[in-house]
Amino acid sequence: MCIRDSADVATREGRWFDAAAEYGIVFEATGDLRVRYAQAEALRYGGNCVDAIPMYEECVEGGQSASIKSLSAGRIEVCEEELAAARAREDALSAPSIPDANPDLTQTTDAPVREPATAWYRDPAGDGLVAVGLAASVAGGVVLGLGRREGNASTDAANDRDFGDSIDRARTLTLAGGVTLGVGGALLLGGVARWVVVHRRGQDVGLAVHRNGVLVSGRLPSLADLRRR
């Protein structure tokens, strides 16, 4: 089996980095930009858009085929959007949390002093749910957009095989984006619910997100409590 055939087999089996390495050997021997495009595709599917973009740019600048140039330009945009989404997720997850204020422990009497309740906007659980939910919603929206873009790009496919692959990728991205967006929305809603409950009660409340909705544990305010407020 020649190296090109071995690279094609690795691609069909989803061994993206093995395929990219073998396509690289073939390209060095032939200089065929179609092989370079296949190598960039393998890297992109393997999650390495950073190394794939220069190869796509090489195909755009030196390719003789109009279809390869068009496909490569489209893939550059897809990669740039994926990298932007990854940076947005990292920024959201690495954002520093608001530090808790130091409570005043000074006591003027012998009576027990109740610690002041945590402000709703400083609740770690609510902050975490909202941050992760927002990041997941942004990522889901981006992936959903990528799926639609992939579907639109299928009309520029060079052959039936590329067209089928593009349709399959569009469906996968659309499904993944929809699921991620839904999960992000649920987490975001859970975080807001946590904030509301903490604000109303002024005390600890347990809250968890399940597949069927948001579970709130603890004693909720009674009707009499609400009337007094």
Image: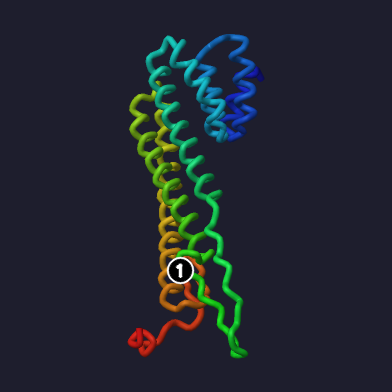
When asked about the image quadrant of residue 70, the answer is top left
Q: Position of residue 33 (x, y in %)?
A: 51, 14
The quadrant the C terminus occupies is bottom left
> Can you identify the residue that label 1 sits on?
120
**Quarter residue 224 falls in:** bottom left
Q: Residue at x 49, y 66 (%)?
A: 209
Taking depth in this image into account, of 97 and 71 the one nearest to the observer is 97
Count of labels shown?
A: 1
> Label 1's element?
helix
Type of amino acid at the residue the image marks with label 1 = Trp
Give the left or right position of residue 66, taking residue 128 as reference.
left
Residue at 43% across / 74% down in the picture?
197
Query: Horizontally, is 128 left or right of 25 in the view?
Result: left
In the rendered image, the vertical position of residue 225 relative to residue 101, given as above or below: below
Q: Quadrant of residue 152?
A: top left
Closest to the observer, 20 or 9:
20
Quarter of the figure that contains the N terminus: top right
